[in-house]
């Protein structure tokens, strides 16, 4: 495996370890599930991954802090999307659509997505640097198994 392939694989795994937070939170809280329920579910996935790699107490604390930051960022993104949808709904009901108002209402969504992108990349780097090469290899194996189950 080339160095580039390893870096890409590890980055992908780190994002997965930080959770289902990305997949779940980026689309909002699903169905009737509360934010608290979703947080517990994501925490369980992250804890399971940390157990699999025998993470230390210090590593667990640092990953938890990373996860907390990402949850806060996703909350801001969700709030921005909700405000945009409200404006979109109001505008759609009008006889004349105000494209400038929609564009202006979308700016916070765009900004929150950019912030999330930067935070996710930073989180990947932080988790990568936090783990030992052996732990990263175990996560790569775990991710490969998950992808096989999901049908790559």
Image (cartoon, grey):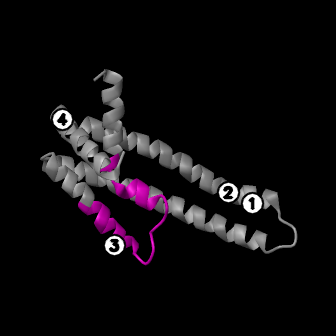
Task: Identify the mark nearer the N-term, 4 or 1.
Answer: 1
Name the spot of residue 93 as percent of width and height, x first. Answer: 79, 75
Give yes or no for residue 103 being in the magenta stretch.
no
To which residue does mark 1 refer? 102
Rounded to the nearest whole Å, what is the CA distance between mark 4 and mark 1? Answer: 47 Å
Rounded to the nearest whole Å, what is the CA distance between mark 4 and mark 3? Answer: 31 Å
Task: Identify the mark nearer the N-term, 3 or 2.
Answer: 3
Residue at x-position 48% and y-position 65%: 28
Q: Quadrant of residue 72?
A: bottom left
To which residue does mark 2 refer? 106
Which segment is the magenta one? Answer: 16-44
Residue projecting furthest to the bottom: 32
Disc 2 + disc 4, Cβ < 8 Å: no
Rounded to the nearest whole Å, what is the CA distance between mark 3 and mark 2? Answer: 29 Å
Name the spot of residue 100 as percent of width and height, x first. Answer: 80, 57
Rounded to the nearest whole Å, what is the CA distance between mark 1 and mark 3? Answer: 33 Å
**Residue 37, disc:** 3
Is most of the magenta stretch helix, strand or loop?
Answer: helix
- Asked whether 148 or 61 is in front, the reply is 148
In which quadrant of the rendered image does the N terminus lie?
top left
In which quadrant of the rendered image does the C terminus lie?
top left
Residue at x-position 59% and y-position 62%: 81
Disc 3 + disc 2, Cβ < 8 Å: no
Label 4 SS: loop
Rounded to the nearest whole Å, what is the CA distance between mark 2 and mark 4? Answer: 41 Å
Label 2 SS: helix
Disc 2 + disc 1, Cβ < 8 Å: yes
């Amino acid at each position: 495996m080339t160095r580039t392939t390893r870096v890409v694989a590890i980055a992908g795994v780190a994002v997965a370890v930080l959770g289902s937070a990305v997949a779940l939170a980026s689309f909002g809280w699903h169905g009737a599930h509360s934010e608290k329920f979703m947080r517990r579910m994501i925490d369980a996935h992250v804890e399971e991954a940390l157990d699999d790699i025998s993470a230390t107490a210090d590593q667990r604390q640092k990953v938890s802090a990373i996860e907390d930051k990402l949850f806060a960022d996703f909350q801001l993104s969700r709030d921005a999307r909700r405000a945009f949808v409200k404006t979109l709904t109001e505008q759609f009901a009008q006889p004349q659509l105000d494209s400038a108002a929609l564009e202006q209402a979308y700016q916070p969504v765009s900004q929150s997505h950019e912030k999330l992108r930067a935070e996710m990349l930073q989180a990947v780097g932080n988790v990568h640097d936090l783990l030992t090469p052996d732990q990263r290899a175990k996560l790569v194996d775990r991710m490969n198994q998950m992808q096989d189950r999901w049908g790559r």
